[in-house]
Image (cartoon, rainbow, N blue to C red):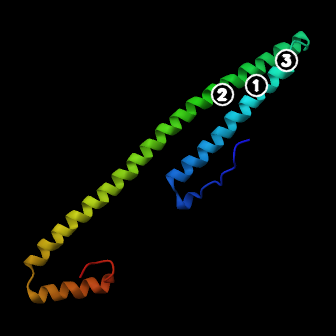
Amino acid sequence: MAEQHARPELKNYDAQATTVYVRAELDAWLETLADSIHSLDALDNGTLPPEQAVFAQHAKDTLAALEDGSKVIDKLLYELGSYIARLEWQRESSRQAFEAGWEASYKDIIAELSDRQYQQLREALKLLGGDRWRV
């Protein structure tokens, strides 16, 4: 049986942890399907009455279709995970670009200020939280 993974909390969403959790759950599902098909094969070793053999074959066919669909979902999940990773990278890249732009603008603003205006800006930024703003 597949190893149990803790379900990540959505309030602290972590795409990687969620992907690991979902993949583990899907792997467990696929393992259960394979075990069920194997059990039906073992049951239907030619000793079932014809009406039960038809039912057993229908159950195996249904489980096989579920297994195929689950494999498609697994591939789509992998693709979705790569899209999420790309979006997270873009978000970080955008944040870095914004910070670089702010740094350049900050220098331009400072260069235009008089001594008095610069002191007022420093005081205002300290009031807003000196640890957040470079003063």
Q: What kind of residue is marked 3?
A: Asp
For the residue pair 4 and 77, the one nearer the viewer reads as 4
What residue is at 33 percent from the left and 81 percent from the top? 131
Does label 3 or label 2 sit earlier along the sequence? 3
Q: Would you call the spot at circle 2 few (<14 residues within 10 Å), some (14-19), or many (20 or more)?
A: some
Does 10 sit left or right of 55 as displayed? left
Q: Would you call the spot at circle 3 few (<14 residues within 10 Å), some (14-19), or many (20 or more)?
A: some
Q: What kind of residue is marked 1?
A: Ile
Does 22 sit left or right of 96 as displayed? right
Does label 3 or label 1 sit earlier along the sequence? 1
- Residue labelled with disc 2: 67
User: Mark 3, mark 2: which one is toward the viewer?
Assistant: 3
What residue is at 47 percent from the left and 40 percent from the top? 80
- Residue labelled with disc 3: 44
Residue 112 in the image: state x and y as whole percent.
8, 77
- Residue labelled with disc 1: 37
Residue 134 in the image: state x and y as whole percent.
25, 78
